Amino acid sequence: MQNKPALLLSLILACTAAGAEPLNYNIVEFDESVSATVPRDTMTASFVIRAEGRDRSAVNRAFTAKLQSFSRRAEGKTFETAQFGRTAVPTYEYRNNKRILTGWQESVEFSVESKDFAALNRLIADSQAEAEVQNTSFSLSKQKQKETVDELSRTALHRFQERAADLGKALGFSGYKIVKLRINESGSPSAVLEKSLAEGRYAAMPEALSAPAAPDLPVSPGSEEIRVTVSGSIQM
C-alpha cells in the first residue's frame, strides 16, 4: 500500500500539471466565404512548326523559313512567346526486316500568350502556312487573380469580424479575441480548346465548353469563380 507522503506528493504533482494546462472556455469556431465570377483575361495558343523531306539540307531550309516567318509575326508587346521542344530527327521505314533511312524532320513548339484575343486570333489565321495550332486555352492572369483574391480577402475578413461581434453580443459578451485564423482560396480551372486534326475543329473542355467550334469563329473565354474562405475561432 502506498504510504501517505508519497500519495500526497502524487496529488500535488497532478494538480500542478492540471493547473499548467490553459483552460479554453467560450470558444466559437465559424467561417465566412465570399466569391466572385471573373472573366478570363488571357489567351494562350500552342503551335508546332515542322518541315520534313528526303534531303536534310532542304528540310532545314524550309524549316528555317517557316520559323523566321512565324517569329516575325509573333514579335511585339502584344504577345509573350516561349519556344521549346526543338528537334531534328531522321525518319525510317522497314523493308525486308531492314531499317532504311527515308528522310528528315525538324520541328519546334511555341507557346504564345496574349490578353488581346483578337490579335492572337489573327496570328493563328495568318500563320496557317507556317505553324499548326495544337490547342488554345483561356485563363485568368496572375495579376487579375491576385487583385481579386486580395479584394475578396478583405471582404471575407470584414464579414468575419462583423459576425464575431454579433455572436459576442448575442451571447452577452462585450468583446472577443481571435484565437485562430486561416484564409483559403479556390478557383475553377482554365478552359482548354484542343484541335481535332481529323475534323479540323476545336473540342472544348471542360463540359461547359463542350460544343465544338470552327477555328475561324470566336470562342468565348468564359469565366472563373474565385472563392475566399476565412475560417477561425474566437474566445469571448
Image (tube, rainbow, N blue to C red):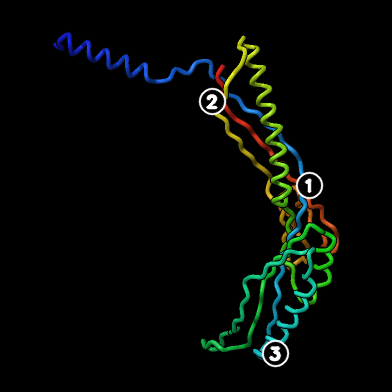
Along the polypeptide, which appears first: circle 2 or circle 3? 3
Q: Secondary structure at mark 2?
A: strand
Residue 205 has which mark?
A: none
Q: Which residue is mark 2?
A: 179
Residue at 59% over, 81% down? 89
Q: Position of residue 109 (x, y in %)?
A: 67, 71
Q: Secondary structure at mark 3?
A: helix
Q: Position of residue 155 (x, y in %)?
A: 71, 32
Left or right, 123 with reference to 192 = right
Residue at 58% over, 88% down? 101
**Camera-side mark, 3 or 1:** 1
Q: Quadrant of residue 123?
A: bottom right
Q: Which residue is mark 1?
A: 39
Mark 2 touches mark 3? (CB < 8 Å) = no
Circle 2 residues within 10 Å: few <14, some 14–19, many ≥20 = some
Q: Which residue is mark 3?
A: 58
